[in-house]
Image (cartoon, rainbow, N blue to C red):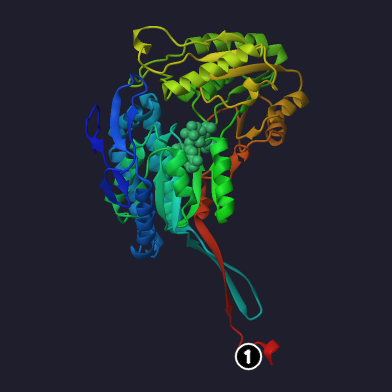
Amino acid sequence: MSLITESKDLLPINIGGEMRLGGGDESATLYPATGEVVARLRAPSLADVDEAIARADHAFRTSGWAQRKPHERAAVLYRVASLIRERAEPLAQRQRLDNGKPINETRALVASAAATFQFFASACETLEETITPSRGDFMTMSVYEPMGVVAAITPWNSPIASEAQKVAPALAAGNAVVIKPAEATPLMALELAAICEEAGVPKGLISVLPGRGSVIGDAITKHPLVKRVSFTGGTSTGKHIAHIAADKMMPVSLELGGKSATMVLDDADLDHAVNGVLYGIFSSSGESCIAGSRLFVARKLYNEFLQRLSVRAAALRVGDPADERTQMGPLITAKHRESIERYVELGRSEGASVRTGGARPQGELYARGNYYMPTILEGVKNTDQICQQEIFGPVLVAMPFDNEEDLIAQANDSVYALAAGIWTRDYKRAWRIGRAVQAGTVWINTYKQFSISTPFGGWRDSGLGREKGRLGILQYMEQKSLYWGLNEQPLAWAN
Ligand code: NAD
């Protein structure tokens, strides 16, 4: 595996198992900390997209992958997990260059990708089909079939982990996969596909088609041979994909945006809550769908809590992603930082005051990177745009609440419903609020903890469908019922 830095060569992409230059526009991936070119490549042309999908369909039908016994497919996926682990450090370093996350985070993402392959290998070899209750002289079964070519469309914020989350179950289920990574971060998908092939996934079964979403992603989604799309990204893109899927009668899963509420009750353990809230919003520089970006604090604690929180936020180590001590790296692109700056201005125009941050950090270290300071805004209402729209950056809005009813009403007053956090010592209140809050995931006295065994997804504008969990593999399979007639006599009706 190559760790490209400043190579002048164009990087080939994986078109149906063939590594070659795409026929589309040239683009460069930039290291967000310095703006240096990490790699240049050419996106696929639309003809390349057609070819990759045709090859995937051919490989699905002829490679025998879907017909291999589950434990044989699983063995290949276990090998993928081992290869990722063997190369964990160079992969983590490459991901750092690709999207600028601190090295400790990219190490965790690589480890998570390996664990995901291991988990779905095991789901593959232990998946059970069912004999449903018999009715007289019929025996009935429910079995699962792979779908064919499925597409995995991913965003830039957690490349190898979000790709593994789709590719592992899709391959485990016996499908071919076309990966469409985000334009800004194509490198990890290419590495992952190469590892899959090395581990024994037949060539052609995986393609990697980077490039503009509105061109390449759109063409993949509309392609008649693509039988399912698993999408992670913004809500407006997800809705667009859902329309195309409706026209094709194609199943989709949509992991979309969020504006998750973190709630600090008046009996919370403040040390835990301060740490958890900080981690919930500012890790990954807030570029996280589940970022706890709307903070509600019990009024009687509000001033003390905000004081402690803002002192700690201002002390976070923002800087070089290669430094193991760094807590917040740069944002993905200069354009994305500008969008965050516009949001902070919007907040100010809505009457927000900046408790801490609200600017780019100054100094030599930050001069060439897309850095932004951890920012806390207050003096806002939950109905303000700054509290309703996803910012996807290191910006927290903070509000006091008066009672539980008021808290739940405000927490649920959002088009998004992806995640929530509750900080309290009272498990009965946690239970009550945890059940009342509308969200796909609720963390109690913790935040942003994940397990591959636990289903993940959003309600409302935060998405459709679930990823992860042992049954996540079924998202990539069609269910089929088989009826076996066991009666000695012909059907009576025709007599
Ligand atoms: P995005 O929607 O702009 O892009 C996501 C992917 O979709 C990219 O690969 C992009 O090229 C592709 N795409 C864009 N337009 C397309 C189209 N018309 N047809 C098909 N594909 C298209 O999102 P982004 O800016 O890359 O990522 C940030 C968003 O992702 C945030 O809203 C964040 O909350 C969300 N996200 C959600 C989750 C989750 O699990 N719920 C996880 C990570 C990120």
Image spot of residue 27 (x, y percent): 33, 33
Number of numbered discs? 1
Q: Which residue is drawn at 47% across and 20% down?
A: 337
What quarter of the picture does the N terminus occupy? top left
Outermost residue toward the top?
363
Left or right of 334? Residue 247 is right
Secondary structure state at the residue bearing disc 1 = loop
Quadrant in the picture for residue 39: top left
Q: Is residue 280 above or below residue 239?
A: above
Image spot of residue 96 (x, y percent): 35, 28
Outermost residue toward the left?
8
Image spot of residue 94 (x, y percent): 31, 31
Foreground pick, 285 / 20: 20
Q: Which residue is drawn at 25% across and 32% down?
A: 3
Q: In this view, does 38 lie above or below 138?
A: above
Q: Which residue is drawn at 25% across and 31% down?
A: 4
Image spot of residue 91 (x, y percent): 31, 34
Q: In this view, does 375 lie above or below 31?
A: above
Q: In this view, does 139 lie above or below 85?
A: below
Residue 465 visible in the picture: no
Q: Looking at the picture, which amino acid does disc 1 mark? A: Gln
What quarter of the picture does the C terminus occupy? bottom right
Residue 303 visible in the picture: yes
Q: Which residue is drawn at 55% across and 55% down?
A: 248
Q: How crowded is mark 1: few (under 14 residues within 10 Å), some or many (20 or more)?
A: few
Reading the image, the residue beneath label 1 is 489
